[in-house]
Image (spheres, rainbow, N blue to C red):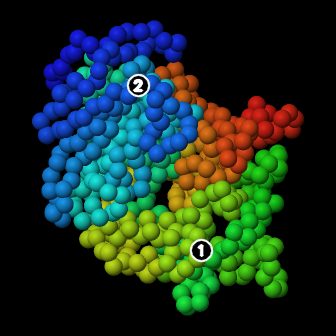
Amino acid sequence: MRYLKFPWAVLALCAASGQAWSQTTDCAAFAAVAKPGMRLTTELIAGDTVRPPGLQTGPMLVAHCKVSGRMDERVGQDGKPYHIGFELRLPTAWNGRFLYQGGGGNDGVVRPAVGPQAAPGYALNRGFAVATTDAGHQGPTADFGFDPIARTDNAYNAHDKVAVTAKDLIRQFYSKPADRSYFVGCSGGGRQGMMFTQRFPQHFDGVIAMAPAMRVSKGATIAAAWDTQALQAIAPAAADGQKVLSQALSDGDLEVLSKGILQACDGLDGLVDGLVSNPAACKFDVSALQCKAAKDTTCLAPAQVSALKKMTQGPKNSAGQPLYFSWPWDPGMGHPQNDWRAWKLGNSPTGKANSRHVFLMEDALQGYFVTPPDRSLSIYKFDFDRDPQRMDAHSWIFNTADDVQLAGYRARGGKLLFIHGMADPIFSADEMVDYYQRLQAQHGAATADLAKLFLVPGMGHCQGGAATDSIDGLGALVNWVEKGQAPLQIEAKGTAVFPGRSRPLCAYPQYAHYKGAGDPQDAANFACR
């Protein structure tokens, strides 16, 4: 393939972190490199003048060339226009690396390509060229599922094309290819990262898959229906007779649950600190919280205990066969800063629920998780015997839980880093542990050179909660890929709930244990064991 050369393309600069490259002119001319069937627009953004769109606080962005593109424009089978949209941001001072920023939800929007999951700060500000995509459809709902090409684009095809295109544009802009290529994504983006290691192992040297949606189209969505139905069954009725899902468990009930888990399991890591850092030793039984007589503020009603047991055991069909995984007991489930309520219960005071399981997962279930799409399918009426079969046709191209061979990715020496919150309310940490254990069963001791798993006590979905949830996974991954330093632990810092606290995240199956002396807020006083 012939690449265009520009006299203004690069200057070799010495930087403290190694070699850096810089373009030296207005990036407007770069739009002319668009290939047939592609449209590009460019904008030169001066350093320290803007933040990512929608953010009022946080660091300003470094100087860079913002490239907005679209390709493969067409009219879908449903009569709607489609294209693959993407954004690529090219820093003036480039560190020679490329980062693909994963999406999430139903995608359908081009998020700012700044690498926000590269805490602290942004990957763009650390010198990475960063790309994002809308996954081949426009709009955040699952309506695209009515077009078969859009389904395939969303599952994998658009991501392959954007990765190839971004690398091509990087090579032209800097007159050299990226030295290393990385992927970071959470949820749907975590699934995309796993997908790359399986379908397109040649694209990335290192992948971070956070809370990956590896079974979302036949698994976690079934669990969402299971939990919604379990909670709806015990929800009180409003004056109009409609059940109010959000009130199945009050904030006070969730606090009782959180405190009960902490009382049973907090000290098992050598320190009572509001975290259950040794989940393997936690033998919490929610029955201990059941009221002995009338319901009061210090206990849970029998129906609430039964519902919580049913939910944490995971969905089953009428024959008792599991349809997803169990869930760990973590105090983050009941913490007000966690997103457990938002996903499972919502806060609507009426019979029209606003939990994410209802308005987000039901949308995906109807639009593209069942084949053919079915807008009449209610999450409240999901049949656990009949309806899972309707999810087979799409799950085989979308889900990523089955492949533990990773033959192509292992052959190129790729590194795979998993991060998962123990209080994640949509994808169970037990599912993540199961995948990692199957990797170990397949590869034995060689797993240590391929993949690492880090569980985050108290963290919800992707971030937040009563946790040390500020994690520089990207720095750890770069050191692993480029220096051969496999991460045995990664320091994590508290944000909203535990400011000033640091903890080591330990590579599974180890956990952070307090040494018994020293500042309990300092990671240096904990050991992985």
Q: Nearer the viewer, residue 227 or 353?
A: 353
Quadrant occupied by the N terminus? top left
Q: Amino acid at mark 1?
A: Ser
Q: Position of residue 477 (x, y in %)?
A: 51, 31
Q: Position of residue 260 (x, y in %)?
A: 78, 65
- In the image, residue 351 above or below residue 187: below
- Residue at disc 1, secondary structure: helix
- Residue at disc 2, secondary structure: loop
Residue placed under numbered mark 1 in the picture: 246
Residue at position x 26%, y 13% from top? 8
Residue at position x 15%, y 21% from top? 2
Q: On the picture, is 392 further left or further right than 30?
A: right
Q: Position of residue 390 (x, y in %)?
A: 33, 72
Marking on residue 188: none
Q: Amino acid at mark 2?
A: Ala
Residue at position x 61%, y 46% from top? 455
Q: On the picture, is 484 further left or further right than 91?
A: right
Residue placed under numbered mark 2 in the picture: 46
